[in-house]
Image (cartoon, rainbow, N blue to C red):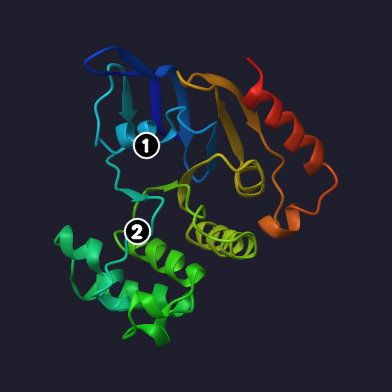
């Protein structure tokens, strides 16, 4: 079942001197309970696509069809934690903004904090958390509204490589346990092929779909998949698709 159909989507920006085509004729589906990766060079329109899906921007042409009423959770590149709020206050911030704070919602947030190792830090401030813990908190804040679709925009780009591998495992586990449809955008090939079920490769600007690859599904963590023999060739193939004209 497809939750979203993206059909012939294009986006143009106009400056005082020229027209910039960010996306051109993009068509794809977001399948329920899947993890879709969108990858491409910097500037190929990945974040623009997310902004259109979340209705922060309008397309120039084409459309997006939601096949049911959806709640979309959008986690941006920076964790955007408010330093003057505690861990708990940051975790419920999205609920407060959407006026969804009630007993059930608070219990759910506490469950997430306990399950993912942050409950004992409820009264701490973000400055006292490691990079990985901050990312987990940002994800919990996004999940608190119980989204049907989770959009992750370069979620590990601010972390060092060891932290990225660890938090990739954490996020993958959370996604699978909650059985939540997820779309991840990145320019990091290894992250995408170890996290995702399917990978959509965009050309350099203007962003068009170069290729969609169905990845081998394995019931293993991203860090375990990194060690598989086939990964090196797959990495090389995707790198070539990204850079070939």
**Residue picked out by circle 2:** 142
Rendering quarter of residue 124 = bottom left
**96 lies above or below 55:** below
**Residue picked out by circle 1:** 50
- Residue placed at 36% from the left, 32% from the top? 48
**90 lies above or below 208:** below
Along the line of sight, which residue is nearer the eye, 49 or 163?
163
Rendered location of residue 227, percent (x, y): 80, 54
Rendered location of residue 206, percent (x, y): 45, 18
Asked if disc 1 and disc 2 are in contact, CB closer than 8 Å, the reply is no
For residue 160, the mark is: none
As drawn, the residue found furthest toward the left would be 99
As drawn, the residue found furthest toward the right would be 229
Rendered location of residue 177, percent (x, y): 53, 62
**134 lies above or below 204:** below
Disc 2 is placed on an element classified as: helix
Report, in whole angstroms, how far the alpha carbon at label 1 lies from the one at label 2.
Answer: 15 Å
- Residue placed at 33% from the left, 58% from the top? 146
In the rendered view, does 50 fall on the left or right side of 245? Answer: left
- Residue placed at 14% from the left, 61% from the top? 99
- Residue placed at 46% from the left, 29% from the top? 29
Residue 29 seen in the current view: yes
């Amino acid at each position: 079942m497809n939750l979203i159909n993206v059909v012939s989507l294009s986006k143009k920006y106009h400056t005082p001197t020229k027209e910039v085509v960010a996306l051109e004729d993009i068509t794809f589906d977001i399948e329920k309970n899947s993890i879709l990766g969108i990858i491409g060079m910097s500037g190929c329109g990945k974040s623009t696509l997310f902004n259109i899906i979340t209705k922060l921007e309008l397309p120039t042409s084409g459309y997006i069809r939601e096949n049911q009423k959806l709640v979309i959770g959008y986690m941006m590149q920076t964790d955007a934690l408010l330093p003057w709020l505690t861990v708990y206050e940051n975790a419920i911030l999205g609920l407060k903004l959407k006026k969804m704070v009630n007993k059930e919602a608070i219990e759910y947030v506490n469950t997430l904090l306990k399950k993912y190792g942050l409950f004992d830090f409820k009264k701490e401030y973000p400055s006292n958390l490691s990079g990985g813990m901050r990312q987990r908190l940002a994800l919990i804040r996004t999940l608190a509204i119980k989204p049907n679709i989770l959009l992750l925009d370069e979620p590990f780009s601010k972390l060092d490589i060891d932290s990225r591998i660890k938090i990739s495992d954490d996020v993958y586990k959370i996604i699978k346990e909650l059985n939540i449809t997820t779309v991840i955008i990145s320019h990091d090939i290894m992250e995408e092929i170890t996290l995702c079920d399917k990978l959509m490769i965009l050309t350099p600007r203007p962003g068009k779909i170069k290729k969609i690859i169905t990845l081998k599904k394995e019931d293993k963590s991203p860090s375990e998949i990194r060690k598989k023999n086939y990964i090196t060739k797959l990495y090389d193939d995707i790198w070539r698709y990204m850079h070939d004209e």
